[in-house]
Image (cartoon, grey):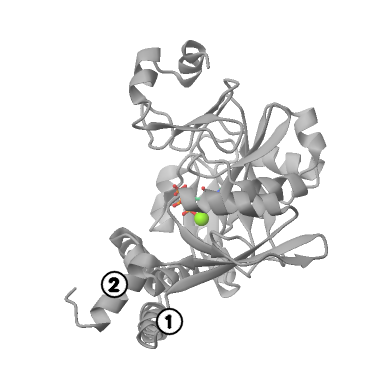
Amino acid sequence: MNLERISEKLGITKERLDGLQGTAVKRSSWPEPRLLRFEKTTSGIEAGTVVFENGEIVFGYPKIRRALMLAPAIKKHFSDVVAVEEKMNGHNVRVTSVDGETVALTRGGFICPYSTEVARRLLAEEIFEEHPGVVLCGEMVGPENPYVPKDIYPTETIDFYLFDLSRKNGKSTLGVYKTHEFARDYSLKATALLGEFRKESAPERIEHIVRKLGRRGREGVVMKDPENRAPPLKYTSSESNCGDLAVAFRYYNDYALDFFVSRAVREGFQSVEWNESEEERKARALRLGESILLPLVDTIQRKSSGENIVQKVQIRVKSLQTAKEFEYHLHRSGMRAIFDQPEPDDDGYLIRITKLIMSTNDKTQALLEGEMW
Ligand code: ATP
Ligand code: MG
């Protein structure tokens, strides 16, 4: 790699890049192509930024800040019009073509073998033939998403929804209109554009949208300036906040404290901003309480009857090589998982995966045996 040229494109000195290697910047030699990966945000370079061995850079997808109080946040943040897109709940991938091969990068900047196979299946080759520099930023969602399995979307397996576009070697994204136009041109699915509102009327409209999405189990919205003058903001439904809590309490020792606190706090602000009646507030309290207690009780009971605490997911692959590589990919990110024998189906294989939730499993066992917290 020509580090001189790369550091220039990254906007840092070569000495700085040298100094970061091994700490914030890690090498990854598998799967091909080899790459450098920014594990942490440093020197203004977003975590998840990847430098491929051919010198091309894909910058990390920027963090999206969250509004807790919709109306004041919108008033403060946006200049006039707010475009509202559905926020989909899966995993973030950046799909691009490197030396003619399509690869899908995870948020952290790894090439995910499964996401890559899915991207190659769903995205027409002509996209990258006609736009060799493009980076498709999207969410992979569905019941066969092994990171975030959800059966709330219209797919039996896994699907890709485009929500942004950028180019290799550039940090900027192309914005709402260009993204949706591109999706139309190439018959890609895109995250639904639910409306564009003047900022004065936006909070009320968004409240209505988020309530409706929540009733369908959907996550919430991302608010965007259609002219790209301000970065996007996110806001989620109570059902989604509670759904996250239910998963986190089921595996309570494997999540950071902030994950729990931040979601409970969102519920408080939403309840106040939406001016709930006593009855509505009671319903929220019940939903919140149940999402904490019921999964927790279930975990304790399972362990106490001798079960291991696991999470079952599944994937469908065309090639067994992909499954093998995905197994390795999970292992290297510290996940312990058991892959069942592949079950042949129409056009490939179904593979059931049991993720071992070690910390919660061991902690629960110890506590049941009288260990102190
Ligand atoms: P972040 O660091 O961006 O806050 P996070 O890992 O906490 O990320 P989320 O809370 O899910 O993630 O929120 C941001 C993510 O939402 C984006 O990175 C993207 O993957 C996802 N997303 C889903 N739908 C959209 C959309 N319509 N526009 C932008 N991002 C979307
Ligand atoms: Mg998400």
The amino acid sitting under disc 1 is Glu
Going 73% across and 62% down the picture, which residue do you hit? 349
- The picture places residue 251, in percent across and down from the top left corner, at 39, 70
The amino acid sitting under disc 2 is Lys
Tag 2 or tag 1, which sits nearer the N-term? 1
Gap in Å between the C-alphas at discs 1 and 2? Answer: 14 Å
Relative to residue 11, is residue 78 depicted above or below? below
Q: Which mark is residue 211?
A: none
Image position of 246 (left or right of 228): left
- The residue at which mark 2 appears reads as 363
Relative to residue 290, is residue 61 depicted above or below? above
- The picture places residue 200, in percent across and down from the top left corner, at 50, 52
Q: Quadrant of residue 359?
A: bottom left
Q: Secondary structure at mark 1?
A: loop
Q: Quadrant of residue 141?
A: bottom right
Going 37% across and 82% down the picture, which residue do you hit? 303
Q: How many residues crowd around disc 1 within 10 Å: few (fewer than 14), some, or many (20 or more)?
A: few
Residue 94 visible, this orientation: yes
Residue at the top extreme, as displayed: 4
Relative to residue 249, is residue 184 depicted above or below? above
- The residue at which mark 1 appears reads as 307
